[in-house]
Amino acid sequence: MAWDVDGRRSRVMAAAVEEFAERGFSGGSTDRIAHSAGVNKERVYSYFGSKRALFGAVLSDQLNQLAQAVPLEITTRDSLAHYSGQVFDYHVNHPHLLRLLYWEALESAEDLAEASLRSAYYRSKAATIKQAQADGHVRQDLDPGQLLCTLVASCAWPLGVPGVAKMMTRHDLATPSGRRRQRAAIMAIVRAMTAPEAAAGATR
């Protein structure tokens, strides 16, 4: 009889996403994860080794899905604005990722999952922005890494604290119309902030 190892592992991962997104690492239970996945707890440990390793695998997989779904390609002056809209859409449709990142920041600030791999990934994003600056698509006076951080934060932070964001913007992110307005505003700001001519205005 053939064992469906890949299917079981996938079910464990899916169950762990739900569990850790709702309760974080400390509150997450491998017993509940195993029960939801339809396997015994020992099977969870045989696949991942530890609860900490499972949390890291879940977060890394979720980040990899974002990277594959929304690649950063800058070929025009509008590319970063469109990218910001796509990142915003992804977080709207995949709320678990933000929750996992917030839990990680709260519980594991000094021990981030797969930190070296993630750092390399973000450096490659910054290098893409730097090349776009050289190509004349993005203003050259901004640090690429800081620009990336600001762009991602503008897309994700309002969804993480929608009540506070509503106080500031009057956009109700619980509604489709509010999300559309927020998305358009983010894109407009990114477009204005990164336009090559904006650098000349900043020095006046």
Image (cartoon, helix red, strand yellow):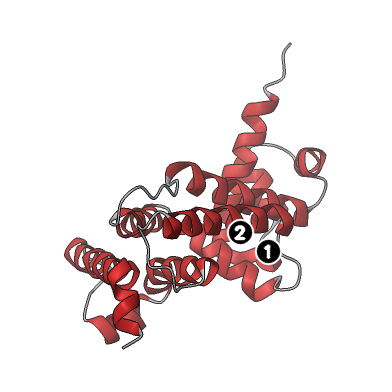
Report how many numbered discs are placed on residues in the image.
2
Relative vertical location of residue 178 with respect to residue 7 in this rendering, above or below: below
Residue at x 47% of width, y 58% of height: 129
Residue 69: quadrant of the picture: top left
Residue at x 50% of width, y 69% of height: 149
Label 1 neighbour load within 10 Å: few <14, some 14-19, many 20+ = many
Q: Which mark is residue 189?
A: none
Residue 168 location (% of width, % of height): 28, 86
Which residue is labeled 1 in the image? 25
Residue at x 63% of width, y 72% of height: 105
Residue 83 location (% of width, % of height): 36, 54
- Name the residue nearer the viewer: 22 or 34: 22
Please state if 111 lies on the left or on the right of 8 as rendered. Answer: right
Relative vertical location of residue 46 with respect to residue 132 in this rendering, above or below: above
Q: Amino acid at mark 1?
A: Phe
Which residue is labeled 2 in the image? 20
- Name the residue nearer the viewer: 36 or 72: 72
Question: Mark 1 and mark 2: span between their CA atoms?
Answer: 6 Å
Residue 52: quadrant of the picture: bottom right
Helix, strand or loop at disc 2? Answer: helix
Marks 1 & 2, CB-CB < 8 Å contact: yes
Residue 30 location (% of width, % of height): 71, 52
Residue 95 location (% of width, % of height): 43, 58
Label 2 neighbour load within 10 Å: few <14, some 14-19, many 20+ = many
Q: Amino acid at mark 2?
A: Phe
